[in-house]
Image (cartoon, grey):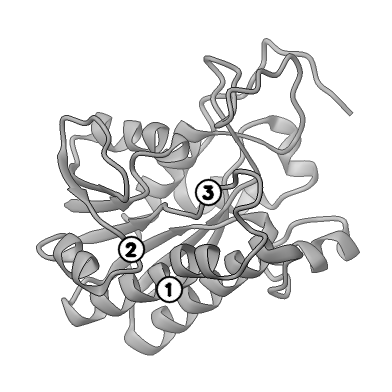
Amino acid sequence: MKVLITGAGGFLCRGLVIPFEESGAELRLMDVCDFETSHEKIIGDVSNPADVEKAVAGVDAIVIGHMASRQAGAYDEVELPFDANVKGTALLFAEAVKQGIKKVTLISSGAACSVDAKKQGFYSRDLAIGGSGMYGLTKACQEIIAEQYAREHDLTVSSIRTAYIHDMDSMCDKYGKKASEVNAQYADRRDIGEVTRRSLLLEGPRYEIFYALSTPEASTQYDVEYTHKTLDWQPQFTYEAYPRSV
């Protein structure tokens, strides 16, 4: 299986690709900025139809891992987050249909359903879509696009909802912020990658929502049990050596 991964130069996807590499998958990696890799590389903008057409040509599956920067101010206006998160996602799904690609996985977030989750006190798979702020709005839009394309075009699509994306080895997040203790929201980027890889092995057509988090405590706040059962997956990076925060 040849897999296109977008946002491949970012913090999340630099870890997400590791399980794919270990499984021997053929990868095509795409980002808007140049980055180092031993895999096939495309520098392009997911909001540009010509770049998307080139990136999708000849692959068997797509992982939508890009998102607009979370740096300060990036979500203060509409254009940048909607171009990357929403328009880019829609273009990738449209091109997948055009080129006959049947398997797509979206890296989403609990932010896509955070309004209902806060009411219920638990992130289940059947929450109403609805986020807070510009980031939550764009993640909600991504999931709406993913579900509709799966339903209308008989695709096998998974939305992977995660929380605090992290790296257990360095104990740092994408900003280089180092943690000394962890909680239920921690998700090592390699665990997210393995959930993503396994989601592409599902037979369809179908639309699935999977929570990908790493610590045992995650099950108190997120429906990770469905992910464990459906994908025959258990997290590798459980942060066992680190103290827990409240």
Dot 2 or dot 3, earlier in sequence: 2
Query: Badge 3 is on which residue?
Result: 69
Query: Badge 2 is on which residue?
Result: 46
Disc 2, disc 3: CB below 8 Å?
A: no
**Residue 244 in the image, given as x and y percentages of width and height:** 81, 21
Vertical placement of residue 220 versus 157, above or below: above
Helix, strand or loop status at disc 3: loop
User: Amino acid type of disc 3?
Assistant: Ser
Name the residue located 39 percent from the left edge and 68 percent from the top edge: 88
Vertical placement of residue 51 versus 169, above or below: below
Vertical placement of residue 227 versus 100, above or below: above
Q: Quadrant of the C terminus?
A: top right
Helix, strand or loop status at disc 2: loop
Dot 1 or dot 2, earlier in sequence: 2
User: Counting other residues with Cα less than 10 Å from the Cα at mark 2, is it few (<14), some (14-19), or many (20 or more)?
Assistant: many
Check residue 87 in the rendering and tell me which mark sits there, or answer none: 1
Helix, strand or loop status at disc 1: helix
**Residue 109 in the image, given as x and y percentages of width and height:** 61, 55
Vertical placement of residue 239 versus 64, above or below: above
C-alpha distance separating marks 2 and 3: 14 Å
C-alpha distance separating marks 1 and 3: 15 Å
Instruction: Tell me, yes or no, if residue 47 can be seen here.
Output: yes
Dot 1 or dot 3, earlier in sequence: 3
User: Amino acid type of disc 1?
Assistant: Lys
